[in-house]
Amino acid sequence: MPARRRRQAAVALKHNLGQEAAPRVVAKGYGDVAEKILKLAFDNDVRVRHDPDLIEILAAVEVDCEIPIEAFAAVAEILSYVYQANAQPFSGEKTS
């Protein structure tokens, strides 16, 4: 029996460092919508991280709402990576 492939999912976060207590979900979607979110991210040199477990948590958050406390540790790690990476040239590759 072939392995079941998960449907593509994407969640976009926004965080204004120093202005907001927690990151907010600004877009989310599955399938074609997820592909569009990812394309926009890549086209605009936005860093992308593949994390299926985190997607499960964040997909339950409504758009324009802060992320839940359960996601803080994982999102903080990702944001730390993004803030550091933004200080370096972007090569367009995905990270995992």
Image (tube, rainbow, N blue to C red):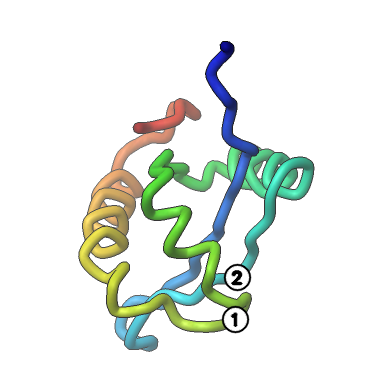
Q: What quarter of the picture does the N terminus occupy?
A: top right
Say left or right for 90 vs 79: right
Q: Residue at x 25, y 64 (%)?
A: 76
Q: Residue at x 68, y 39 (%)?
A: 39
Label 1 Cα crowd, 10 Å radius (few <14 / some 14-19 / many 20+): few
Q: Nearer the viewer, residue 65 or 80?
A: 65
Q: Nearer the viewer, residue 61 or 1?
A: 1
41 relative to 83, above or below: above
Say left or right for 28 vs 91: right
Please identify the residue farthest to the top as the structure is shown.
1
Residue 72: assigned label: none
Say left or right for 10 vs 32: left
Q: Residue at x 68, y 55 (%)?
A: 29
Q: Which residue is disc 2 drawn over?
A: 26
5 relative to 21, above or below: above
Q: Nearer the viewer, residue 59 or 81?
A: 59
Q: Which residue is disc 1 drawn over?
A: 64
Q: Residue at x 45, y 26 (%)?
A: 93
83 relative to 62, above or below: above
Mark 2: secondary structure: strand
Where residue 81 sits in the image (x, y, percent)? 26, 49
The first of marks 2 and 1 along the sequence is 2
68 relative to 52, above or below: below
State the separation of the CA atoms marked 2 and 1.
Answer: 5 Å
